[in-house]
Amino acid sequence: MLPLKKAYGEVPEGFSRVGPLTNIAQAIERFDVDAQALFASVGVSGELFTDPDNLISPQTCGELLERCAALTGCPHFALLLAQNQSASSLGMVGELLPHCADVGTALAHLQNYLHLHDRAGMATRTIEDHTATLGYTLFAGPLAGVDQIYDGTLVIAQNIMRRLCGPNWKARALLLSRRRPENVRPYRQFFQCPVEFDAASSLLVFPASDLSLPIAGADAGRCKLLQEELESIRGRHDLDPLAQTRRVLQALVVLQRCSLASVAAELSMNPRRLNRLLERQGSSYRQLLDETRCGLALRLIGNTDLSLGQIAVVLDYSSASAFTHAFKPWQEVSPLQWRQTHRRAAASAARRLDSR
């Protein structure tokens, strides 16, 4: 069933606009594959991709991209799909970025407004000494085609950086939170930098000095108008305190800087007020922290070959055994048992997909 088109910014939790996928039929047909038959094989209509404001879930997107990779015989299909997608595929948020005064301001706006385009994941950015990063993380646990989603999203992130910094811009490194593919050459060709797989996060690493670069051709008047419009849209469709807290936790857990005080500071409120707001919505900081750690643990166990000890370090546990002790109440099995079961289920799902 085709999701109802929504006004810009009116995106339900767990969905995103299909803007970055609007050229998918053309990309499929370059491989002499019937796009409409492929869409039907995963239960979607080609009409979904005719309007960038239509909505899609990461589960449907992942299954579709995985099917595309299988039927086209191109394991790096998402890299090809995203190569011509830029900030404009993000709608009004993307329109704003090239008109900001400098790169750092543009990336701050990208992170602050991306939920008006995408509520299935979030943009991440960090600055540490002389190094900065720009990345993306999904909120959902392991799902089919997540490797393709991260591949395509990081290509779009690179295209955005090249629009802001100049066409010859290159990252210092690319990190992908996915298993190493058999053929890494396409990744090196697309990104022209060292590529690391089995990473805790999916992101581009670059000099922090790039953030101060002025953006060529920026129109201050256009920037002001777009930002005013986005603020108006955000006022009507902003995140509630629960969703805001989940996003801050998602960012801080990987940085190992997560505490009630640090989360409250990111939200510009004191810890007591944050606790009260969460209690009114039937939650708590501790509950959300456990949910965030569990979700990240499942993604890393399911999508990477990181050892349990390495995952324990990412999640800020003292040891693999401490991580295992925390994990069992979440899933009622050990992390190792969960990984084995997940891999069998994923292999079975792939066989079913191939047989359609």
Image (tube, rainbow, N blue to C red):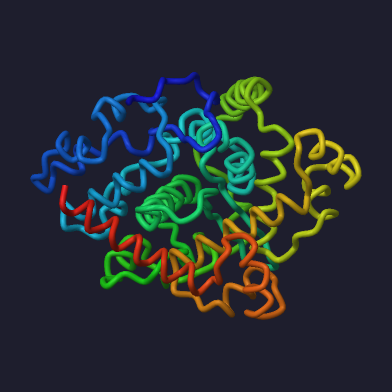
- Whether 206 is drawn above or below 246: the answer is below
**Residue at x-position 60% and y-position 35%:** 113
Residue 315 relative to residue 280: left or right: left
Q: Single out the residue that lies furthest toward the left.
A: 32
Relative to 23, residue 68 above or below = below
Q: Which quarter of the figure is the N terminus placed in? A: top left
Q: Position of residue 272 (x, y in %)?
A: 91, 44
To which quarter of the image does residue 116 belong?
Answer: top right
Residue drawn at x 49%, y 51% is 165
Q: Is residue 115 visible?
A: yes
User: Residue 216: x, y in percent?
Assistant: 51, 42
At a point 69% along the width and 76% down the height, the residue shown is 322
Locate residue 256: give its quadrant: bottom right
Side of 141 relative to 340 (left or right): right
Q: Where is 349 relative to 178, above or below?
A: above
View extreme (front): residue:
332
Answer yes or no: is residue 167 visible.
no
Count every numbered label the image shows and give the total.
Answer: 0
Q: Nearer the viewer, residue 124 or 170?
A: 124
108 displayed left or right of 76:
right
Q: What residue sits 13% from the left and 45% below the top? A: 30
Q: Residue 351 location, x and y as percent?
A: 22, 58
Tell me the quarter of the picture where residue 331 sits. bottom right
Q: Position of residue 185 (x, y in %)?
A: 27, 70
